[in-house]
Image (cartoon, rainbow, N blue to C red):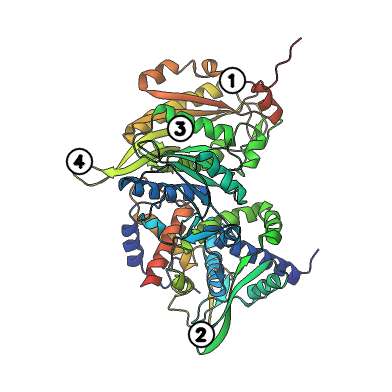
Amino acid sequence: MAEPGSLGGVSQTEIQQMAEAIGSPPSEAGASLSTRFVRQVSSLVAARSAVGESGEFSVFIRSESLISDLAKVAYSEFPLLMNGQDTVSDRAWISTASLNATYNLTLAWTDQASLYTAVRATGLGHLPALVVDWRPARPLGHFYPDGLGSPDLADRVIFEDIPISEDEMKEAMDNFYNRSLRSPLLIAEGHADRVWSDAAKGIPRDRPEEKIQGRLTDALKSRFARHDVRAEPVTADGRADVIVYRRTLSLQNLPAVQTQWVLELKALCDMTSNGTATGSSHIPEAIKSGLEQVVAYKGQLSALRGAVCCFDMQKKDHGDNAIFNHIAASAQQLGIDLWRWFLFRSTADSRQAKSLVTVTK
Amino acid sequence: MLPADEHLSVRLRARALQLISALEKAGGAAVSGKDLHAFAYLANVLSPLWELEPLDGSILKDDDGPYYPTLQKEIDFLIGNSIVTVVTLERIKAGARNILGASFILNRDKSNSILECINRLPDESRFEVFLLELASAFLEINKDQRDDAALYDAAYSDPAISTGRIVDFAEWVSSTTQNPSWNAAQSFQQYMPAGITLSPAEKLVMYMRLLKRRAHG
């Protein structure tokens, strides 16, 4: 029987040496398989871009059952593709999330349309796929989580580690909302931790921000594939909800971290998780506190940008102006973005808000 | 209601499918029998890191590495029912003996619907996420050294427990403070820079990299 605190056959020195060798926490830990895949492909694309790779398109397909999937197509094996020494453009690839076993698919295609058609024709059109467009000066990425068979469902992937603009971050957040949070059905489909305890009655789960945080972190890691994303880093003023940063070198050529974004998440609820109504001052105070937090963390972390991200779970959508009116001037003065997304309590409400049908009398 | 032994058998069968599935999804197909037992052991000894209950809290220490006869019985059952397919079969040396070693994959036509049911259960869906994290880290170890990784695990390699004795990490002892593997994984926190609190996933990956380094020599 081991004594409490025993390290068994491992020594404390070994652990210390290992921790020092690893340095910072491994960025892939906790990521979904799709996000790991996107980040692995991004590393490969960066390596190939650095040696001047050009061409038209690459498609990387992620398999969870490689042996069965390979049985459907002709292929050749490229076990060392991750080393970055092989041309990847104008080819279709299939691999697992880690890219530790990679195969080049023998497909006949001449342009983007025939590439998508060729992949679908193999029966692999339902598998997650990342398409790289090599034609611009900097390659562009589109990730299809449901495969090339569902081309309408695509997420952009940023292959560069340059600062993320306000527009890019807002687009990423909008996409995350539209894909994962807009309606209770989307939340369930995403296999995310549910934010609603009873959506129809408007009762949230306890601390809905925490449920959103894990999923958002994964989505941002996938989109900004050359950046790192971390939840809950500690600062002297408390824990920031999400930061997006990149590892770089200081002017003295020493390893350094540049925090690009601080995101403070706020769920705006008019009910507690027990189903009782919150007071009228609760939401304005929560937003004001969010602004104070993001300003403090931005300063502590020397971040380039910050935003208060509000997930509005109230019964009625009052609009941005009414929600942010009391702090809008301060936020603008402090250079903090105020963003809000309304979480519908039913799929029907969500559909209706999109005004898909116009009734004429 | 199922009798207790059948209940355990069904749970083990479900776990066997989850283990193979996680390794396959992370890129480890076809899964060798030895790797699967090593992976099953690591899943048991490290699951308390994610506040999950291990299916087996102890194991007989063997020079050849962890081996679960009850798990093997369920794998045989799954093969017999075409839910798992044997890909290779070869003679391998196990100490002084020669035994038949198999590698296998899931027959997705049959296993997918079963796995969907299993993973819909709240605790099991969390276990699936844990297994995928563990499998991704396990597969970073060189293929021919993966089964050795378990031999280098903190609890399994505890010099206080000799071969032929029981390694108890969660049966009669606390699965946390009296589990050397849990303690070792937690220890990484003290070497992190200020302001960084490691998540269970990060501790797991760092601990598995330690096993990788030990296995690679």
Q: Which mark is residue A280?
A: 1
Badge 4 and badge 3 in a common chain: yes
Q: Residue furthest bottom?
A: B96
State the image coordinates of residue B84 (x, y, percent, origin top left).
66, 68
Tag 1, which secondary structure? loop
Q: CA distance from mark 1 to mark 3?
A: 22 Å
Q: Which mark is residue A251?
A: 4
State the image coordinates of residue A351 (x, y, percent, origin top left).
67, 26
Residue shown at 54%/89% (left/top)? B97
Q: CA distance from mark 2 to mark 4?
A: 56 Å
Q: Amino acid at mark 3?
A: Glu
Tag 4, which secondary structure? loop
Q: Are marks 2 and 3 in contact (CB under 8 Å)?
A: no
State which mark lies toward you, 1 or 2: 2
Q: Quadrant of residue A133?
A: top left
Q: Amino acid at mark 1?
A: Ser
Q: Which quadrant of the figure contains the C terminus of chain B?
A: bottom left
Residue linked to disc 2: B93
